[in-house]
């Protein structure tokens, strides 16, 4: 196989993987209201454990994933990740039958485990498969695959599991017959069985296809270690730009999940009906797709990665403030537009943070993937704040400081410990 053809095949395979984990990741926005209703949860804080269970898996599994990849290589590691995700999907079947919220959370955690392995392999792979200067462009292409899938997934799952949600919610709230109420909840819960059974089978088929695919292995050369640094490094902790990047990615994923998964809960707190709020996640993700298209056109031809990140941070600050000072659907619009601000952050932060790591690329990637735990922590902080302050105030307090730090990283943090010519 020629090098050019091999490159195209590799990009295509990784694109399919980004589509898959985008589809699964952004189901959480639909699962939050669905599980709150079907499992008869008493508060939004309980429902937001959906994102906590899912994203905390990254924190616990990212570093072990780097050691697994060292043994299996990228290709087999990706295949293994898909198999683990399938197990998590299949666990939804007994969880739905018993309306067991804890079992649902376990399934989500296992899916997060598989995605941690998949992300630890696929993100550095797409970053180093070509020139580092254009890594953000390649990751933007992957981002389109990811976010198009993410925009479709809540619409598809929402149409199945939340069809007529407002009426069902009303019936559950008003019925006085305990047995009838349980039956309504049981019927609702069973709606996820077929979708997750299909999902698990598809993941197993993809795992097999990846295993036998011609995806080549890519290893970082020891001679690349340290990039422009003249002194060889002996520890991952000698790369301050990486450590600051981990925090940056932690905060970025936090605000991305706030804009994508929490937007429905935010809208409901403003008095909007569940039949409307179930689609809000898709609005955020379509605005992210627009941002990725902008990234593909402009990076690196017109914008350097750090410039794109700086611009994105400014836009995030502006939209977060506008969401706070406006009301109703206008406020929702600005939260959805945060997707535009967030779109180029991962494509910029990840390659900037792993630049020059050389033989430490796998472990550096794993540390960055640990930062995805920001998606677990920030919604929980929001849920707690929203109990004591107005919803819009809680949202601003959770997002504005994050965008300010991202601006710092785009301006100075990515240079820490490096000799960079700008």
Image (cartoon, rainbow, N blue to C red):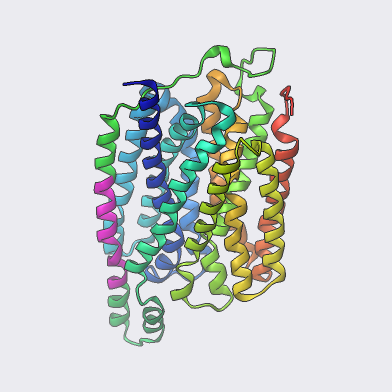
The answer to whether residue 310 of the structure is visible from this angle is yes
Looking at the rendering, which quadrant does residue 310 occupy?
Answer: top right
Q: Indicate whether residue 237 is drawn in magenta.
A: no
Which of 404/62 is in front? 404
In this rendering, is residue 187 above or below 249?
A: below
Looking at the rendering, which quadrant does residue 267 occupy?
Answer: bottom right
- Residue 70 horizontal/vertical position (percent): 42, 22
Q: Residue at x 66, y 22 (%)?
A: 238
> Could you tell whether 285 is left or right of 187 in the image?
right
Q: Residue at x 60, y 63 (%)?
A: 335
Which of 358/306 is in front? 306
- Residue 68 horizontal/vertical position (percent): 40, 27
What's the magenta bit mostly, secondary-structure-wise?
A: helix
The answer to whether residue 94 of the structure is visible from this angle is no
In this rendering, is residue 215 above or below 310?
A: above
**Extent of the magenta region:** 186-202
Which image quadrant: the N terminus? top left
Q: Residue at x 56, y 19 (%)?
A: 358
- Residue 402 horizontal/vertical position (percent): 68, 50
Q: Residue at x 25, y 29 (%)?
A: 212
- Residue 364 horizontal/vertical position (percent): 56, 28
């Amino acid at each position: 196989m020629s090098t050019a053809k091999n490159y195209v095949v590799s990009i295509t395979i990784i694109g399919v993987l980004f589509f898959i984990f985008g589809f699964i990741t952004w189901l959480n926005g639909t699962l939050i209201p669905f599980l709150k209703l079907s499992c008869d949860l008493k508060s939004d804080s309980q429902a937001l454990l959906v994102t906590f269970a899912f994203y905390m898996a990254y924190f616990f599994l990212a570093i072990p994933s780097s050691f697994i990849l060292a043994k299996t290589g990228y290709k087999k590691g990706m295949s293994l990740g898909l198999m683990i995700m399938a197990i998590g999907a299949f666990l939804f079947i007994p969880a739905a039958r018993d309306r067991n919220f804890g079992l649902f959370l376990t399934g989500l955690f296992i899916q997060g485990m598989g995605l941690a392995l998949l992300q630890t392999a696929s993100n550095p792979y797409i970053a180093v498969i070509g020139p580092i200067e254009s890594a953000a462009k390649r990751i933007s292409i992957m981002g389109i695959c990811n976010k198009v899938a993410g925009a479709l997934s809540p619409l598809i799952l929402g149409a199945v599991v939340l069809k007529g949600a407002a009426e069902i919610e009303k019936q559950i709230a008003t019925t006085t017959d305990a047995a009838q109420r349980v039956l309504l909840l049981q019927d609702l819960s069973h709606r996820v069985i077929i979708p997750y059974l299909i999902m698990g089978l598809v993941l197993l088929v993809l795992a097999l296809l990846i295993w036998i695919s011609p995806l080549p292995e890519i290893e970082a050369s020891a001679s690349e270690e340290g990039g422009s640094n003249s002194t060889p490094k002996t520890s991952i902790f000698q790369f301050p730009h990486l450590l600051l990047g981990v925090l940056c990615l932690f905060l970025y994923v936090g605000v991305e999940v706030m804009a994508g998964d929490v937007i429905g809960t935010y809208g409901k707190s403003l008095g909007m009906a569940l039949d409307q709020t179930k689609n809000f996640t898709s609005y955020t993700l379509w605005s992210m797709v627009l941002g990725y298209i902008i990234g593909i056109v402009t990076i690196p031809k017109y914008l350097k990665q750090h410039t794109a990140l700086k611009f994105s941070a400014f836009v995030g600050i502006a939209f977060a403030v506008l969401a706070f000072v406006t009301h109703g659907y206008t406020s929702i619009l600005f939260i959805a537009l945060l997707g535009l601000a967030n779109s180029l952050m991962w494509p910029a932060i990840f390659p900037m943070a792993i630049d020059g790591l050389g033989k430490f690329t796998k472990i550096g990637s794993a540390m960055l993937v640990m930062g995805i735990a920001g998606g677990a922590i920030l919604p929980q902080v929001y849920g707690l704040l929203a109990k004591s302050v107005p919803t819009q105030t809680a949202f601003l307090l959770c997002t504005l400081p994050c965008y300010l730090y991202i601006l710092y990283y785009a301006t100075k943090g990515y240079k820490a410990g490096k000799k960079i010519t700008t």
